[in-house]
Amino acid sequence: MAYTAADKQGNIRTGKYKFLVLLLLLISKVWLASAQTDSLVLSYQEYVDNIVAFHPVAQKARLKAQYAEAGMMGAKGSRDPYIDASWSSKELDDKLYYEKLKTKLVFPTSLGVTFSGGYENTDGAYLNPENKTDEYGLWNLGVEMDVLNGLLTNERKTAIRQAREYQHLYENEQNMLLNDLLFNALYSYHTWQMYYYSMEILTENISIAHTYNENTRNAYSMGEKTAMDTLESSIAYREAISLFNKNELYLVKARQKLENYLWYNGQALKLQPGVKPESYDAFYTNEWAEFDSVLINNHPLILTSINKLSLTEIEQRLKREKLKPKLKIKYDALLTTSDDIRIHGFDMSDYKLGVGFSMPLFLRSERAGVRKGKLKIQELELDIMYKKNELYNKAEASRQQQNILKDQIEIYEQNAVNYERLLEGENEKFRYGESSVFLLNKRQEKYIDGKLKLTEAYVKYRLELLRYLYLSNQLVTNQAE
C-alpha cells in the first residue's frame, strides 16, 4: 500500500510525479486517509511487500526450489533407459576378417535389478566361435541382479532419497534467506523510523531554543536581562542545532541503509525527498506473539540441520550396505530368428548365465566409512540440541526484554507529559521574571530528552519484538503473508 496526500493548498500532484512515487512505493492501493501534509508515507507493510517481491536476495531464495527440482530430475535420471550400441569391422586383402554388430536397450530400476533386451549379428572368417551368429542374428532378453550388496540399497535408490531430502533442505534454506533478509531490512526500517521522528523532536527543540534566545536578547536590549543570560541562551540555541545536525547524520546513514532493500524489476530505488516512515507508536502493542517449543523446532535453522542429518543417515545406510559381499547374477534368454524375421519361441536350453562374486578381505575402507558416518551423525545431533537450546533461551530472553521495555515506555510516557508541564510552568515564571535562562534551558533539556527517550523506547520495543519473531520462527509468517 502506498500513501500520498495533497499539499496544504489542496493542489493535486502531477501525474508524472505520482507515477514515479508509485513505482517507489509499489503501486498504490489506498490513499492516506487524512491529507494533512505534503509528505508520502512508506508504509511498513508496503516495504515488506517490496522486499519479498523484488529484492535480489528474495529472488535468489526462490531459485532454491528450482535447484531442488533439477536435483530430483538428475536423481531420477539414474533410472532412465538407455541404448548401448557398437559396430566394428575388419577387412584385409579382400577378405572379411570380422564384422560385429551389438545393440542393447537397458532398463535400470531403483532396486539392484536391471532389465535389458538386445540384438547381435556377426560375420567373418576369423570370428571367435563364441561370438558367431547365423546370418539372421541373435536376440536376447536379460536380467542382472545384485543379490547381496546393492539389492535394496544402492547408488540409484540413495540418489533419489537424497534428492527428496535436498528438496526439503533447499526449502528451509530459502526460508533462512528470507528470514535473515527480512530481519535486517526491518531493522533498518525501524532505525530510519527512530532517527526520522527524533529529527522532528529536535526541530521543535531548535524552535524553542531560538524563541528563548530572541526573547532573551530583546530583554537584554531593554535592560531586563544580563549579557550572561544572552550568552547562555545563545549557547543553548547552538547546542540545539548541533544535536539536530548530529541526528541528521545518523538519519542520512539510516536512509542509505534502507535504500539497500528497495528494488523494483531489477532496479535499485532511492527514497524520494519527503518520503517518511509510519509513526513509531503505531507498532506498539501489549499483545504477545504466540510462542511454544514447536516453533523453535520448526525454525529453518533447526530444520536445515535436521535435513543435513537425514542426508548423512541416508549416506550411512549406503556405507553399511557396502560391508556386504558383492554377488551379481546375470541371465540372458537367447532368441533366434528365421528368414522372415520372426522370433522363435523361448527355449530354456538357449541362454547365457553368469555369476560374479567379490569381497574385500579386511573391509578396512568400508568400516572406516561407517565409523566416520556414525561420528558425523553424533556431531549433527549434538549441534541440533545446542541450536534448539540456544534459540529457546534467546527467545525467552527477548520476551523478558520486551516486558522491561513496556514498563519503560509507560514511565517515559508519563515523564514526557510531566516534563512538558514543568517546561510550561517554568516558561510562565520566566515571563514574570521569577526564573532564569539557566532553569528554563534545563527544563527544555529535560523535556526534549524525555521525548527522545520515549521515541527510542518505542523503537527498541519493536526491534526486540522483531528479534523475538525471528528467533521463534514467526517472522516470515507474520510479516510476509
Image (cartoon, rainbow, N blue to C red):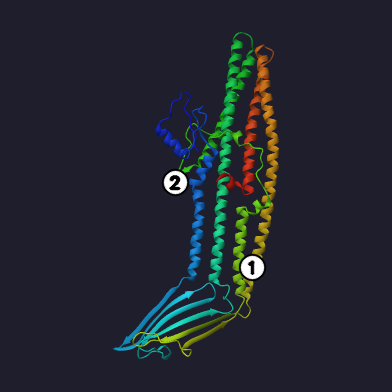
Q: Is residue 87 visible?
A: yes
Above or below 425: residue 26: below
Three-letter amino acid code of the residue under disc 1: Lys
Residue displayed at 51% across by 73% down: 109
Can you give x and y, in whole percent of width and height, for residue 140 in the image?
44, 83
* Closer-to-camera residue (39/110): 110
The span from disc 2 to disc 1 (Cα, nearest Å) is 46 Å
Residue found 48% across the figure and 65% down from its top: 74
Quick one: SS at disc 2? loop
Q: Which amino acid does label 2 sit on?
A: Gly
- Name which residue lies at 65% across and 25% down: 447
- Which residue is denoted by mark 1 in the rendering? 372
What is the quadrant of residue 223 in the picture?
top right
Q: Which of 145 and 313 is in front in this view?
A: 145
From the viewer's perspective, tell me whether residue 56 is left or right of residue 97: right
How many residues crowd mark 2 within 10 Å: few (<14), some (14–19), many (20+)?
few
Per the image, the residue denoted by label 2 is 266
| N-terminal label among 2 and 1 | 2
Q: Position of residue 197 (x, y in %)?
A: 58, 31
